[in-house]
């Protein structure tokens, strides 16, 4: 008997990324159930997970978690390859690029709140750029820009404070095994 | 232990806040006019700055139209037209706004830095 199954070696990193991505996907699904007065204005709770991963395991892991979240979130919400999926992907891409630069800011002065706010602006910036170029070219998006920017500022700040609180929580050895014990 | 908000964070928040305010002013502020153009029977009879308070009396076929200018705004204060539409429009502030008193053939239009329309036909 020969084994026909192809075995992919799964390392500890893979398991960790999968677990964190599952957490981010859960938050994405929970958030999709929240009603929003303006389409596109969302708290971005999954970004809490992305930021925690970035600060604890580096940018590569954060990129993996973010990518998996966008893909699996699209699958679960039934919007895979629909405009909403591409908006999500564009936001995640720009947000990750911003974080790739912003993580080099000196830690002494710039904490999770800075990273979160910058990532939130990157997120909405990427989404609006895609909307402006592809989905609604020439539409009067300008009138909505302040709303989106204000939402990015508020939710970015709130998410950043949550990240800072989680990181500052006691029992760092426990956190290694359960990295995202969210309050 | 690091505190939640560090010096750079406050800077980022302030920068973000000023970005939001700038966007709001840019997107919602509009173009405040600085000149009032008054026409009678299609011809410009007066071009007045909105800098200081003035009143004009313009004669038309039905009678006299009173136009009032205050710093930053202008209106038709009194008009002999039967429906008083141009009077009810109230104060005009934005570039491109216009009040027309059609039976009396008097119009008041606000101009600003940019022209909202190339031309308006009445």
Image (tube, rainbow, N blue to C red):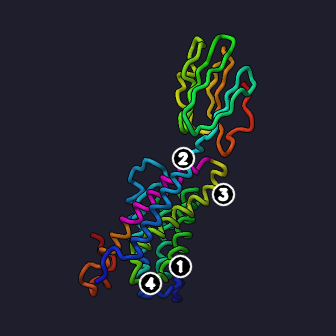
x%, y% of residue B43? 75, 25
Residue with the mark numbered 4: A106
Q: CA distance from mark 2 to mark 4?
A: 37 Å
User: Where does residue A118 sit, x and y in percent of width and height?
Assistant: 48, 70
Q: Nearer the viewer, mark 2 or mark 4?
A: 2
Cα distance in 3D space between marks 2 and 1? 33 Å
Marks 2 and 3, Cα distance to the nearest angstrom? Answer: 25 Å
Name which quarter of the figure residue A44 lies in: bottom left
The mark lying in front, picked from 2 and 1, is 2
Of residues B52 and A38, the one drawn nearer to the viewer in this rendering? B52
Q: Residue at x 48, y 72 (%)?
A: A66
Residue A108 belongs to the span the image colors magenta: no
Magenta segment includes A142: yes
Q: Which residue is mark 3?
A: A133
Identify the residue at horizontal 61%, vertical 40% (top origin): B33
In the image, residue A178 sits, relative to residue B102, either above or below, namely below
- Badge 3 local density, few (<14 within 10 Å), some, or many (20+)? few
Residue B100 in picture, x, y percent from top left:
64, 23
Residue corresponding to mark 1: A101
Q: Which mark is residue B29?
A: 2
Chain of the residue where label 2 is placed in the rendered structure: B
Pointer 1 local density, CA inside 10 Å: few below 14, some 14–19, many at least 20: few
Residues drawn in magenta:
A140-158
SS for callout 3? helix
Q: Residues within 10 Å of mark 2 (few under 14, many from 20)?
A: few
The image quarter containing residue A109 is bottom left
């Amino acid at each position: 008997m020969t084994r026909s199954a192809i075995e992919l070696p799964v390392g500890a990193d893979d398991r960790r990324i999968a677990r964190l991505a599952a957490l981010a996907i859960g938050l994405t699904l929970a958030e999709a159930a929240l009603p929003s007065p303006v389409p596109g204005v969302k708290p971005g709770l999954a970004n809490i997970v992305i930021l925690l991963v970035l600060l604890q395991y580096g940018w590569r892991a954060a990129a993996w978690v973010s990518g998996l979240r966008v893909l699996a979130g699209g699958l679960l919400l039934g919007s895979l390859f629909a405009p909403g999926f591409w908006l999500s992907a564009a936001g995640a891409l720009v947000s990750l690029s911003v974080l790739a630069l912003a993580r080099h800011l000196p830690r002494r002065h710039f904490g999770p709140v800075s990273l979160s706010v910058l990532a939130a602006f990157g997120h909405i910036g990427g989404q609006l750029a895609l909307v402006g170029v592809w989905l609604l070219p020439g539409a009067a998006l300008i009138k909505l820009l302040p709303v989106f920017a204000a939402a990015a500022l508020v939710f970015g700040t709130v998410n950043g404070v949550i990240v800072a609180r989680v990181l500052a929580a006691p029992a760092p050895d426990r956190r290694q095994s359960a990295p995202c014990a969210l309050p | 232990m690091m505190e939640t908000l560090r010096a750079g964070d406050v800077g980022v928040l302030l920068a973000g806040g000023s970005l939001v305010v700038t966007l709001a002013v840019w997107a919602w502020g509009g173009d405040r006019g600085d000149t009032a153009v008054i026409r009678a029977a299609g011809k410009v009879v007066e071009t007045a700055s909105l800098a200081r308070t003035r009143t004009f009396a313009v004669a038309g076929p039905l009678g006299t139209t009173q136009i009032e200018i205050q710093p930053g705004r202008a209106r038709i204060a009194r008009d002999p037209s039967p429906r008083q539409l141009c009077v009810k429009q109230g104060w005009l502030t934005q570039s491109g706004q216009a009040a027309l008193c059609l039976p009396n053939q008097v119009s008041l239009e606000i101009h600003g830095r940019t022209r909202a329309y190339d031309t308006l036909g009445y």
